[in-house]
Amino acid sequence: MELFTFNKVGKVDPTQLQQNSSHPADEMLVAGKPKRTSKPLVDFEPWRPGVGFWEAEVGAWNFVYPSNRNEIFHVLEGTFSIESETTPRIEFTKGDTGIIPSGFSGTLRVYEAVRKMYVLLA
């Protein structure tokens, strides 16, 4: 799905993007049962970056990031942290930019409902 074309200057309205919502699987849950919503602007494919917006409610879950992609993100609202057995807790809040490397395995904790813009790279 590509809702945005790169053949002219344009303005993105995230409220007009198709959204996909889910909850972490029960075996991944650490706290709560937070709803997560992604609004892709450009779907990720191995030969091109994915771009979009992601939101999550308060809660925590374990996750494993796919081995075929890396993420760069910028936090637009909220506060969350990421940690693992080898990565001490790193907190991200409005205005912060961060990365999640391919194959990362850890825990994401949302303290205040979060919204971020992301870019996925192979």
Image (cartoon, rainbow, N blue to C red):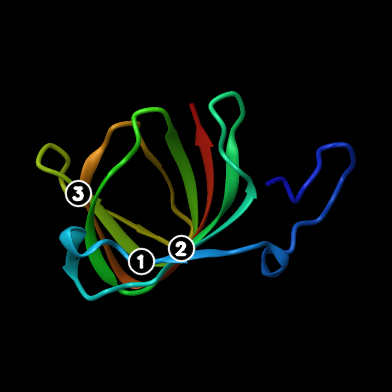
Q: Earlier in the sequence, mark 3 or mark 2?
A: 3
Along the line of sight, which residue is nearer the eye, 87 or 39? 39
Query: Residue 89's x, y, as percent?
Result: 19, 51
Query: Residue 12's x, y, as percent?
Result: 75, 57
Kind of residue sitting beneath label 2 = Lys
Whole-number angstrom distance, CA of label 1 to CA of label 3: 14 Å
Locate residue 87 relative to residue 24 in the image: left or right.
left
Q: Which mark is residue 83?
A: 3
The residue to which callout 2 is attached is: 94
Whole-number angstrom distance, CA of label 3 to CA of label 2: 18 Å
- Within 10 Å of disc 1 (Cα), the crowding (few <14, some 14-19, many 20+) is some
How many marks overall? 3
Q: Quadrant of residue 36?
A: bottom left
Q: Marks 3 and 2: CB-CB under 8 Å?
A: no
Along the line of sight, which residue is nearer the eye, 84 or 103? 103
Whole-number angstrom distance, CA of label 1 to CA of label 2: 7 Å
The vertical placement of 77 against 54, above or below, is below
The vertical placement of 101 against 64, above or below, is above
Kind of residue sitting beneath label 3 = Glu
The residue to which callout 1 is attached is: 79
Kind of residue sitting beneath label 1 = Thr
- Within 10 Å of disc 2 (Cα), the crowding (few <14, some 14-19, many 20+) is some
Q: Marks 1 and 2: CB-CB under 8 Å?
A: yes
Q: Earlier in the sequence, mark 1 or mark 2?
A: 1
Locate residue 31 relative to residue 81 in the image: left or right.
left
Q: Which secondary structure lies at badge 1? A: strand
Q: Which secondary structure lies at badge 2? A: loop
Locate residue 11 relative to residue 100 in the image: left or right.
right
Query: Residue 114's x, y, as percent?
Result: 43, 67
Q: Marks 1 and 3: CB-CB under 8 Å?
A: no
